[in-house]
Amino acid sequence: MSKILEIALGMVTGIGGFLEAGSIATAAQAGADFGYQLIWAIGVGTLALIILLEMSGRLALVSHRTLADAIRERFGVGYFIVPLVVGLVLSLLVLSAEIGGVAFALQMATGVSFQWWALPVALVGWLLLWKGTFGAIEKGTAFLGLVAVSIAVAALRLHPDWTRVGAGLLPTQPTHERARYWFLAVSIVGASISPYLYYFYSAGAIEDHWDLSYLGINRIVAALGNLFGGVLAAAVLVVAVLVFGPRGIHVERFEQLGLLLTPALGRWGFVFLVATLGINCFSATVEIALSAAYLLAQSFGWEWAEDARPSEHARFSLAYTVAIFLAAVPIALGVDALKLTNVSMALTAASLPVTVLPLLVLMNDRYYLHKHRNGWAGNLALGAVAVLSVVLLVVAIPLQFLGGG
Amino acid sequence: MEHEPQMRPGSTQRGRTRSEARVARGVGAALALFAPAMLTGCGSGGARQTLQKVASWTATARMAADELEARHTTPRYTGKTLAVASDQVASQARSFAPNDLPGALRAPAVGAVTAARQAIRDMSRAAERRDGAALARAAARADSADRALDALLAALPER
């Protein structure tokens, strides 16, 4: 019974991990600009994330090392400095974008400008990290994030053409604005497979004391939880196609998202959208701040555990404190959160090889994984993600200039 | 008389190695490739893109007003969204370069952008005053401007 509960909790957490500022914004932009044509990008991102999470979880529970620990140990500090610096810089950018998402949700609810909410959001997030336990943070925010199911309800109520939705799962050439199309495809994949997700997931496996008996749960949680999240991201795209597409609305600012669900759900649509954006971005804010602290602590060999008192692991606690307040500054200064989100997602996509390629080596290392190493199917799947990550590295930055405006 | 400094085989000026020079040439080529996009602003597509953005914000403003009238959203949210729409359209109108358009479309395009700008500004002011009747009147003008913008966009070739 407790294992079924673990799976259910993992699935719920998957929504919180998947659906955040980046995935909501990029899916809405894609639906408004290109109809159902970019659903395949959500599919690719979801599949890649399932593979990466299952493997980083398996690595953690078999070797009792987080992904960061294992990369540093296997490849040396000389190499590890690359994923460390890249991971920290991107975590700060994505953290800013998430704080921006919460701040915009609060602006929609109150009418008070988003800039004023940045520091209060950071303060509440920090308090939760300071006072809360890992379980409370992970599961509490995830359960509240279930409000995102309202997006799927809205999609059903708008009666999409399911044949065209299904056709969107196959990549097709755009008929207009090619650079924008590919930029959004890259951003969607970047939003789906942010490295913080698998750093956080592998650290969570250690925090939750997962052992070999969790191999099956790890597989189910990684697959079903993210499939659930992916379906909801696709629902955002479908609703944007049907609501913004016919009106000729292109999503350039978070404010426009407040209108996304009202044609399907009326007044409740506005309430649910604000709650979804606020809760899921807040959940991601806390997770990314924690993930940045995990990465730093695991890099320098500091003591780390979210369940311990902050004074016991002072450097770890200082790391998330600095991260969350530093990331709030650009939003407090009025930086355009949606542009920041788009840039962060494209850069995230470009950064993937620095963690994906080492993972491919680690997952075949007998020392870490014993008999639980990757088989041919696992290597084929991770190899495909590695190839995808290299392609993204090459195309993401040029597309940022050509199609990110 | 100045002479070009002699270079040893395998080196370039200032002691750079051949591979460093190759990297520098690569960076130069990349900059040359992307500089036009960087200098013209990301995704700048001239007048057509401006018209598209103005049409999108006009449609956003109309939808915000409709949803407020249906009591689906709050006056605070609508006020803020209309203020943003007004700023965005004003900014697009300032940078609008109608000379990029075919001659016959220039005057109607300027007219449509100006009409959209004024209508959205009035919608924003009406929302600020919580004046529903004035908001509805300005929204009707925005509707006309939006239709004019759509017609212009339909007459322009896709990028």
Image: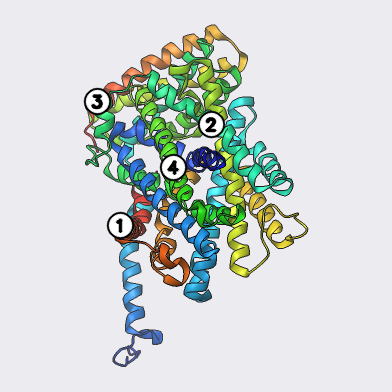
Pointer 1 and pointer 4 on the same chain: yes
In terms of secondary structure, where does tag 4 sit? helix
Q: Neighbour class for label 2 at 10 Å: few (<14), some, many (≥20)?
A: some
Q: Camera-side residue: A211 or B10?
A: A211
Protein chain holding label 1: A
Q: CA distance from mark 3 to mark 1?
A: 50 Å
Q: Identify the residue at horizontal 58%, vertical 67% (top origin).
A: A299
Quadrant of res B58: top left
Earlier-in-chain disc, 1 versus 4: 4
Pointer 4 and pointer 2 on the same chain: yes
Tag 1 and tag 4, C-beta contact below 8 Å:
no
Q: Is residue B113 above or below residue A126?
A: above
- Which label is found at residue A146? 2
Disc 4 marks which amino acid? Asn
Disc 2 marks which amino acid? Leu
Q: Which residue is mark 3?
A: B154
Q: Neighbour class for label 1 at 10 Å: few (<14), some, many (≥20)?
A: few
Pointer 1 and pointer 2 on the same chain: yes
Whole-percent x and y of residue A308? 72, 55
Give the position of the N terminus of chain B as an image quadrant: bottom left
Earlier-in-chain disc, 4 versus 2: 2
Give the position of the C terminus of chain B as an image quadrant: top left
Pointer 3 and pointer 1 on the same chain: no
Q: Camera-side residue: A7 or A146?
A: A7
Mark 1 or mark 4, whichever is nearer to me = 1
- Which label is found at residue A226? 4
Mark 4 or mark 3, whichever is nearer to me = 4
Q: Identify the residue at horizontal 61%, vertical 21% (top origin).
A: B76
